[in-house]
């Protein structure tokens, strides 16, 4: 639906009309000069294919155009792909990913079987669970606590035969909460000062510190708070033993004097 009209196709070696309209107007023309390739397409509404639910045709057409222009139309290799929602995360965050395989024509490989393995920074490995979603699969890497570089390795097979594999790196950052945002936050400081405004709290700029020191030095204390403290004797075991020895010595001295004076 909708196309531009070519004024005419030059008759030359390597030029070929691949598609014509019912009226005989050229719609798709290819040209080859040496190792170079050119493709002229008169259509202007392939975007409507996507909106009408023909996304598979839209993707296949433009992928084949690119493959032909780059001399890759005859490749029979399947491409295994992996997509991650994040590649750099702080510790403890889950990372979801999706995997699949395509043929050289850009079609999804049906009934492909996938296995996923996680390579950790310390050299150890672990298997990842995948759930099937159509011709692709989904998985997640959960709660990675060790900072460093992780690698997710995907292997695809059909009928027991390996058709390809791919890798994707994931970086868990060594995050220090205190140093994650070292920049000053004057707005946050002003909000904290507002919470203590009734008690005299206020935000002071760095250049106003000398004036603040002078103000504190010149201003006498506005409020003296008396704090009541309680003391109990004996407060420590050493004091208790000292008191006991003194008490016993006094009683002994009294008894000795009374006996000497004949009072007992």
Image (cartoon, helix red, strand yellow):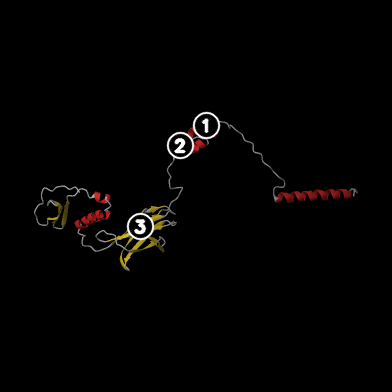
**To which residue does mark 2 refer?**
206
Q: Residues within 10 Å of mark 1 (few under 14, many from 20)?
A: few
Residue 60's x, y, as percent? 24, 56
Taking the spot 47% from the left edge, 39% from the top edge, the residue there is 189
Q: Residue furthest left?
A: 11
Which badge, 1 or 2, comes first in the chain's sequence? 2
38 horizontally vs 122: left or right: left
> Where residue 171 sits: x, y (%)?
38, 55
Q: Is disc 2 surrounded by few (<14), some (14 to 19) or many (20+) residues within 10 Å?
A: few
- Where disc 2 sits, the SS reads helix
Task: Please count the marks in the image.
Answer: 3
What secondary structure is marked by label 3?
strand
Q: Position of residue 135 (x, y in %)?
A: 32, 60
Front position among marks 3 and 1: 3
* Between discs 3 and 2, the one toward the N terminus: 3
Query: From what the image shows, is residue 205 above or below residue 159?
Result: above
Residue 44 rendering spot, x and y as whole percentages: 20, 48
The numbered mark, 3 or 1, whose residue comes first in the sequence reads: 3
* Distance between mark 1 and mark 2 Cα atoms: 15 Å
Label 3 environment density (alpha carbons within 10 Å; few <14, some 14–19, many ≥20):
some
Picture disc at residue 98: 3
Q: Residue at x 30, y 61 (%)?
A: 101
Of residues 113 and 247, the one drawn nearer to the viewer in this rendering: 113
- Disc 1: which residue: 215
Q: Which mark is residue 162?
A: none
Q: Is residue 96 left or right of residue 20?
A: right
Q: Give the SS element for disc 1.
A: helix
**Which quadrant of the figure has residue 119?**
bottom left
């Amino acid at each position: 639906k909708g196309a531009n009209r070519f004024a005419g196709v030059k008759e030359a070696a390597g030029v070929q009309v691949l598609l014509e309209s019912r009226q005989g107007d050229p719609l798709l023309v290819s040209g080859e000069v040496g190792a170079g390739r050119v493709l002229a397409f008169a259509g202007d509404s392939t975007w409507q294919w996507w909106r009408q639910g023909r996304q598979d045709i839209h993707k296949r057409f433009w992928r084949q155009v690119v493959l032909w222009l780059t001399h890759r139309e005859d490749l029979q290799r399947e491409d295994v792909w992996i997509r991650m929602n994040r590649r750099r995360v702080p510790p403890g965050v889950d990372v979801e990913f999706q995997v699949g395989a395509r043929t050289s024509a850009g079609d999804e490989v049906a009934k492909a079987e996938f296995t996923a393995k996680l390579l950790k920074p310390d050299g150890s490995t672990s298997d990842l669970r995948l759930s099937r979603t159509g011709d692709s699969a989904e998985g997640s890497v959960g709660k990675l606590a060790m900072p460093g570089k992780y690698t997710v390795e995907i292997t695809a097979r059909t009928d027991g035969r390996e058709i390809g594999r791919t890798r994707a790196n994931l970086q868990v950052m060594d995050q220090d909460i205190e140093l994650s945002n070292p920049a000053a936050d004057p707005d946050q400081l002003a909000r904290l000062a507002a919470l203590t405004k009734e008690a005299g709290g206020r935000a002071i700029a760095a250049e106003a510190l000398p004036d603040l020191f002078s103000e504190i030095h010149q201003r006498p204390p506005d409020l003296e708070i008396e704090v009541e403290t309680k003391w109990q004797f004996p407060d420590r075991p050493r004091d208790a033993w000292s008191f006991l020895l003194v008490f016993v010595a006094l009683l002994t001295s009294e008894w000795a004097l009374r006996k000497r004076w004949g009072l007992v």
